[in-house]
Amino acid sequence: MVGILLLLCLPFILYLATPKIRKMLSSGVCTSNVQLPGKVAIVTGANTGIGKETAKDLARRGARVYLACRDVQKGEQVASEIQATTGNSQVLVRKLDLADTKSIRAFAKDFLAEEACLHILVNNAGVMMLPYSKTADGFEMHFGVNHLGHFLLTHLLLEKLKESAPSRVVNVSSLAHCAGKIHFHNLQGEKFYNGGLAYCHSKLANILFTQELARRLKGSGVTTYSVHPGTVHSELTRNSFFLRLLWQLFYYFIKTPQQGAQTSLYCAVTEGLESLSGSHFSDCHLGWVSSQARNETIARRLWDVSCDLLGLPMDW
C-alpha cells in the first residue's frame, strides 16, 4: 500500500522538486555582468530554443542582435518578443538557410553591406536524427548544416570579425561528439548511414573546426570556443519519436532552453577567456572531449576537405 501511494505521489513530488533538480543538474550559469552597447552579434537558429535565449540575453546586454533564421516569420515573432522583454529595439531578423550555400552567401553579403562591425558570432543552429537527406548542394544534411554551413558562414564573416577585434566565434557542439568519428571515405553517408551517428559525427566536426580555427587565428584578436549546452528541451528532437518520448519521461532532469544557453553566453561575453581559444566548455567550465576531438591531424584534414567541398581557399 505504501509503495502504491509513493508511486501515485511521485509526479507531485517531482513537480515540487523540479527547481532544485534543475539547479543541481545545471550548475553552469553565466554570471558575467558585461554589457554590450555598440556591439553587434549574430545568432543562427535564434527563432527557438537555445538560440532564442542566447539572442535574448545578448539583447538584454545592449547588443545589436541579428536573428539568422530559416523561418523568417517565426523569427519576426521572436524578435518582437525579445524587443518587448528587453527594451532593446535593435533585434533584427535575416533569412539564413544553412542547407543552401546560396542562402548563406546572400546572408553574409547583405550583412557585410549593412554592418560595419561584428563582435560575436554564435553558430547555434542545427539538425538532429534526420532520415537520410541532402542539402541543396548535395551534402548529407547533418554534415552539411551542422558543420559545412557554419564553416562557410564563418569564412564569409571572418574579415569583419578581424576588423572588429576583439571578437568571438562560439560553436554549439554536444557531448554526443564522443560517439562521433570522421569517416573521410563516408562523409556524405554514401556507403553507410545512421541518423543518430550522423549527428554525432557533425558535432565532432564542430569541435575539430573550433580547434583548427583557433590555431589559424592566433594573434588576430578573434577567439573561438565550442560548447556542450547540456540535454535541453528544444525542437532539436522533433525528428525522433524515441527522443521525444525520452525527453518527456525525463522531463524533470532536462535543462530549459535558458539553462542550455548559459555556456554559449559564458563563452560569448566572459572576460579573460582569450588564452583558452579553441577550448571546449560545458556548464561554463572547461569540458572533456574525446581523443578524436583532440587529434590535430584529423582537424587539419577535415579543414582541407571542407574547403575543397565548398570551393574555398585552404589558407583562410
Image (spheres, rainbow, N blue to C red):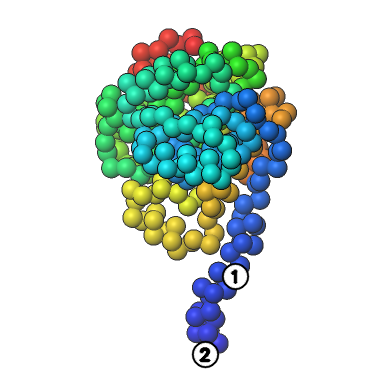
Are dots 1 and 2 in contact, CB under 8 Å? no
Mark 1 is surrounded, within 10 Å at the Cα level, by few (under 14), some (14 to 19) or many (20 or more) other residues, namely: few
Question: Residue 205 appears at what percent x and percent y?
Answer: 46, 30
**Amino acid type at mark 2:** Met
Vertical order, 76 against 183 (above or below): below
Task: Find disc 2 in the rendering and name its residue.
Answer: 1
What residue is drawn where x is 41% and y is 19%? 110
Asked which quadrant contains residue 290, the reply is: top right
Residue drawn 37% across the image and 35% down it: 72
Where residue 64 appears, x then y in whole percent? 56, 29
Circle 2 crowding by C-alpha within 10 Å: few under 14, some 14–19, many from 20: few
Q: Secondary structure at mark 2?
A: loop
**Front residue of this view, candidates 184 and 60:** 60
Q: Residue at x 57, y 73 (%)?
A: 13
Q: Mark 1 = which residue?
A: 16
Of the image marks 1 and 2, the number of the one nearer the N terminus? 2
Tell which of 301 and 106 is nearer to you.
106
Q: Position of residue 82 (x, y in %)?
A: 52, 42
